[in-house]
């Protein structure tokens, strides 16, 4: 097991960061609830599938969660596309296996 790199003990880490991350989890739950109540549009959106696929990584007991989730959500293609179809990135690999 690698040595810890956080200078705080578990208690201090929880004291400092728990409420912030509790709120983030509630935001994700609210987003998923909104999706459940939504109608019309693409119900099988790649972003929704990707999000639902990486959520279990949060509690799988393995380390490097941030890196593993980011790698799973990132587009790893190296060839540029001929033309952008949107003005912004969508946050996941549009061709990923989600």
Image: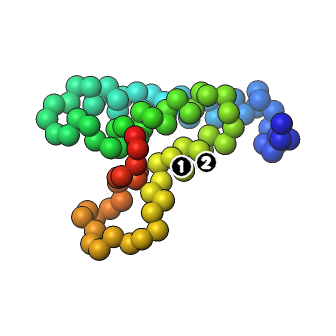
Q: Residue at x 35, y 33 (%)?
A: 31
For the residue labelled by badge 2, is the local secondary structure a helix, a strand or a loop?
Answer: helix
Q: Which residue is mark 2?
A: 67
Asked if residue 93 lies left or right of residue 35, the reply is: right
Instruction: Please tell me the numbered disc located at residue 91.
Output: none
Q: CA distance from mark 2 to mark 1?
A: 5 Å
State the residue at coordinates (32%, 25%).
33
Q: Quadrant of the N terminus?
A: top right
The C terminus sits in image quarter: top left
Q: Which mark is residue 70?
A: 1
From the viewer's perspective, is residue 59 above or below residue 85?
above
Secondary structure of the residue carrying numbered label 1: helix
The structure residue drawn at horizontal position 46% and vertical position 68%, both measured from the top left corner, is: 78
Q: Is residue 77 visible?
A: yes
Q: Position of residue 70 (x, y in %)?
A: 53, 49
Label 1 Cα crowd, 10 Å radius (few <14 / some 14-19 / many 20+): few
**Image position, residue 7 (x, y; %):** 82, 42
Residue 91 versus residue 46 in the image, above or below? below
Q: Is residue 98 rendered to the left or right of residue 59? A: left
Mark 2 touches mark 1? (CB < 8 Å): yes
Q: Does the rendering let one see residue 16?
A: no
């Amino acid at each position: 097991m690698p040595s810890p790199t956080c200078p705080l003990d578990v208690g201090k880490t929880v004291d400092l960061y728990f409420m912030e991350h509790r709120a983030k989890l509630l935001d994700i739950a609210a987003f998923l609830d909104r999706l459940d109540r939504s109608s019309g549009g693409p119900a099988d959106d790649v972003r929704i599938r990707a999000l639902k696929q990486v959520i279990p990584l949060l509690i799988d007991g393995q380390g490097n969660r941030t890196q593993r989730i980011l790698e799973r959500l990132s587009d790893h293609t190296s060839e540029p596309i001929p033309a952008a179809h949107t003005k912004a990135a969508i946050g996941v690999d549009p061709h990923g296996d989600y």
